[in-house]
Amino acid sequence: MLAYILRRLLWVPVVLLVVTFVTFGLGVYGPGDPITLRLGQHANPEVAARLRHELGLDQPFVVQYREYLSGVVHGDLGESLVYRGRPVSALIFPKIWVSMQLGLLATAIAVGAGVPLGLMAALRQGTWKDTSIVSGALSLYIMPAFILAPILLYLFAFRLHWVPAAGWGGLVDKRIILPALVLGLPGIAGITRLMRASTLEVIGQDYVRTARAKGLLPRRINYVHIGRNAILPVVTVVGLSLATLVEGAFITETIFGIPGVGRLAVESLFARDYPVIMALTLLVAAGYVFVNLAVDIAYGVLDPRIRYR
């Protein structure tokens, strides 16, 4: 296992180098000019040229890319083209932490409800409980955030006055409840269906029939022999969702007034704020790489039959 982890870690710089090269190339040669967007179409050409020179955008591609890589290696992600004087790291990391807190709670809601519901539906296959669970989960899945959010706001904030309507106070503040539900409730459907399908496949395995023939308690069979093996596909899906936490959720964060990274990412795309875009892309790529490694390790822990060489 240790040798496998080391081999995977050795590939991390290569993957991130390719990601930075492609992203930087799209930023330099892609459509749109950040200087024109910043100064306007009728800006003085001399002012535009001077600003382009100050930002180093008039240098050759190789020089720009080399300086960017040098900064990344030393922890410098550059300076925002829109928010002058603001380092990219100081601009995005506080917002990423906000979005990650919201995303982690939403993921916990989806997994905490979806896994037991999917297991229960599979164990009660063909009964009214199975139909009710699947139908209820799908009814949540088809409701987008811009419809679910107003419903929850009207019911719990304006009618019952249980939670505040908007704002941000951190993971332990009541203002995180509604946005976490908006993000987490639709995810219950996917986790439920995946867990149900995986459980139905595991139920027919020989080791489950052997456990029943030995007279083991149904609870032990359901949660140790069936549930532990059926949850492996769910681990993959949850791992991939965790890797995207740094992206934020633009609609939900906007509705609830949450200072997350989702809105910043959309604004940076329209403003051609390439340093911010490249930093977010690099962080998402790094997240995918390390989360995939963590998922592989979790496979080996959950299923002793899986061995890496």
Image (cartoon, grey):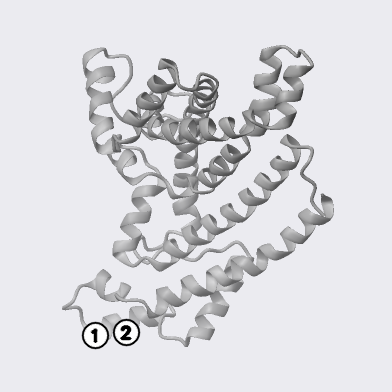
Describe residue 154's horizontal placement relative to residue 307 as left or right: left
Residue beneath label 2, please? Answer: 49
Q: Position of residue 180 (x, y in %)?
A: 41, 30
| Tally of numbered discs | 2
Residue 136 or residue 283, whichever sits in front:
136
Q: Residue at x 52, y 30 (%)?
A: 196
Residue 133 or residue 96, whichever sits in front:
133
Q: Which mark is residue 45?
A: 1
Does the residue at mark 1 contact the one at mark 2 (Cβ under 8 Å)?
Answer: yes
Describe residue 254's horizontal placement relative to residue 127 as left or right: left
Q: Position of residue 279 (x, y in %)?
A: 49, 61
Q: Crowdedness of circle 2 by 10 Å Cα count: few (<14), some, many (20+)?
A: some
Describe residue 112's horizontal placement relative to residue 144 as left or right: right
Residue 111 seen from this side: yes
Q: Which mark is residue 198?
A: none
Please tell me in which quadrant of the rendered image residue 42 appears: bottom left
| Secondary structure at numbered mark 1 | helix
